[in-house]
Image (spheres, rainbow, N blue to C red):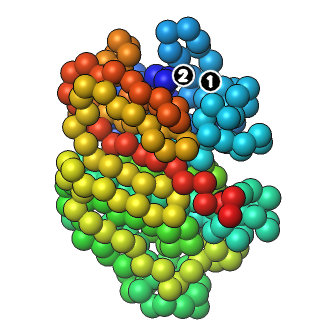
Amino acid sequence: MYIVTPITMETLWGDDRLHEYQGDPSSDTIGCVYTISGIDSINCNIHNHSEHTTLKEAVMKDPEAFGLREGEEYPLIIAFDSCAQDVSFQIHPTDDYAKEKLHLPYGKSEAWYFIEQPAHGWVYAENIKGCKEAVETALETKNFQDVMGHVPVKNEDLVYIRCGTMHALTKGSLIYEIQQSTNITYRLYDYERKDKNGLTRPIHTKEALENLDSSLKVEKQSFSVGSEFAQREFSLQHVCLSDSYTNTSSLAVAISVISGELKAEGLRVSMGGSILVLPGETITIEGNAECMIAVPHAYWRS
């Protein structure tokens, strides 16, 4: 078992609500607190009673301990996201594109659990016109109102977004986010916002349109404590965790604290923190905390 130290990321659209989730208290524009990540650009420190290292280094040193094979990364990135503004319209690479063009094993599907619902009660998702040409026209006119779908969401909803789906979080959203570790986003439109240096962020129109699948629809369900969810990339359980936990999966499982605090094998984990439990491992839990249990699926091997 490892305790994971979260990483703070400031963004143009962030705010200060993630201070409660172990975000850097010196920043008031936090968009993401990464509570599980083991890739080059976002590599969390991990520790237990005998070892201090990073997730990427631990996986490289002993992939089998995590249920992985040599050369594989831990396949999930988990974060808490907070939006003071609408996020850019974006599309993530599909599995086929990732394999053929990026030489990666999988694309980037994700799911959002809403801790606090967006200000207007909906997020952007799906191409409601059902064709790429409509998106190209929207890009020319900078008017997406008749193209981007509005998906109603409320607190404790879970929204699953398959890679290739056009989407964007909206103002007021505070979420737990689970995604595949291909950490690539292709921006279609970013409201022509400028950063503190007066520069607009890169737009990736060609790549975004190459990955757009206009037939895709998001999946949404209420996800209160006791709920479960499974897709090809990962499974989720929303639980109140106490006493003990045994990982019966063949891969390391990520447990993130949504509310409250606990001790795992005597080590404190507070809101926004996470634990990695190795395959076949049983850990003791003191206290009682509301948690998400994320189980990766090694579907890319088949």
Q: Residue at x 35, y 12 (%)?
A: 266
| Viewer-proximal residue among 172 and 233 | 233
Q: How far across and how far down the image is residue 49, in percent?
A: 49, 9
| Viewer-proximal residue among 114 and 145 | 114
Q: Residue at x 63, y 68 (%)?
A: 94
Q: Quadrant of residue 250?
A: top right
Relative to 143, residue 16 above or below:
above
Q: Residue at x 45, y 64 (%)?
A: 231
Q: Residue at x 54, y 91 (%)?
A: 131
Around disc 2, counting alpha carbons within 10 Å, would you say few (fewer than 14), some (14 to 19), or many (20 or more)? many
**Mark drawn on residue 46:** 2
| Viewer-proximal residue among 300 and 134 | 300
> Mark 1 near mark 2, Cβ–Cβ under 8 Å?
yes
| N-term mark: 1 or 2 | 2
The residue type indicated by label 1 comes to: Thr
Residue beneath disc 1: 54
Q: How far across and how far down the image is residue 77, in percent?
A: 53, 44
